[in-house]
Image: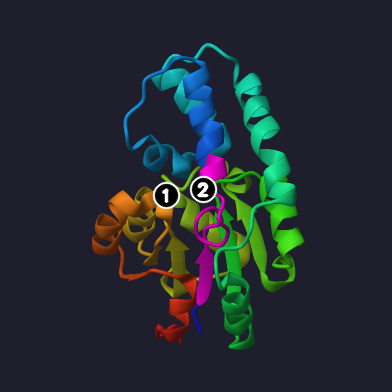
Amino acid sequence: MKDLVFDFDGTLVDSMPTWGGKMLRILIEEGVSYPENIIEIITPLGDAGTARYFRETFGVKASFEELIGRMDAYALPKYRNEIPEKEGVGDTLRTLKARGHRLFVLTASPHHMLDPCLARLGFTPLFDGVFSCDDFSTTKADPAIYDRLCARTGCKKENLVFFDDNLGACETAKAAGVFTVGVYDDSGKASFERLKTATDKSVLALSEILDLDLS
């Protein structure tokens, strides 16, 4: 029976407009020009990684702590109170759990965003482990994160199936030897064809994974 590892933003919950919004808002306020695929680039980095990226790559003068504070001020109320699950996610997770799969979350989002949202949606009891990249002191751009995940959970890497809507995160997981499933999200519409090519399987909605052979 496969162990299933899910990204959070854009895979389980419809949060990418909020997540992307808090990042673009900073660049706009700082008067920084950025490439069209900036969200694709920074999504695997998470909040802390993105704050460092903004300072190192774009020369944003605000301190690391100030950038994190501005992100939180914009997005935290939405994660706590508003962001919905993506269509059919709850029913899909409950079915997978009933089938005997172990379920995990691995996300770039910090726990103070992630945990309240999962709890509000009633998802927390469904997962055998909920992890932020912060728990492993690295990002989903680092293949070593999957070895650290396995060490923490007792999973075997060859038994993992990883679900994510981000092209870079899926490419890293696949390079690490993990079976990958690309999940469509409107925020990645422009790169979905590349995501389909880069992953072992792809789905337009998470409920479609119930038809995959995950034994």
Q: Give the x, y percent position of residue 200.
A: 30, 69
Q: Secondary structure at mark 2?
A: helix
Residue name at image x 67 percent, y 51 percent: 114
Tag 1 residue: 187
Q: Is the residue 101 above or below the residue 76 in the image?
A: below
* Residue contact between numbered discs 1 and 2, judged by CB atoms under 8 Å: yes
Residue name at image x 53 percent, y 74 percent: 3
Q: Is the residue 47 above or below the residue 111 in the image?
A: above
Tag 2 residue: 16
> Looking at the image, which is closer to me, 147 or 182?
182
Q: Amino acid at mark 2?
A: Met
* Residue 111 appears in the rendering: no
Badge 1: few (under 14), some or many (20 or more) residues near its Cα, within 10 Å?
some
Residue name at image x 25 percent, y 56 percent: 194
- Dividing the picture into quadrants, the one containing residue 197 is bottom left
Is 12 within the magenta? yes
Q: Give the x, y percent position of residue 167.
A: 35, 52
The CA distance from mark 1 to mark 2 is 6 Å
Q: Is the residue 173 above or below the residue 66 in the image?
A: below
Badge 2: few (under 14), some or many (20 or more) residues near its Cα, within 10 Å?
many
Number of numbered discs? 2
* Residue 82 appears in the rendering: yes
> Looking at the image, which is closer to me, 33 or 44?
33
**Viewed as shown, does residue 133 lie left or right of 185?**
right
The numbered mark, 1 or 2, whose residue comes first in the sequence reads: 2
Give the extent of the magenta segment. 3-19
Q: Give the x, y percent position of residue 205.
A: 44, 70
Colour scheme employed for the rendering of this structure: rainbow
**Viewed as shown, does residue 85 lie left or right of 208?**
right
Q: Secondary structure at mark 1?
A: helix
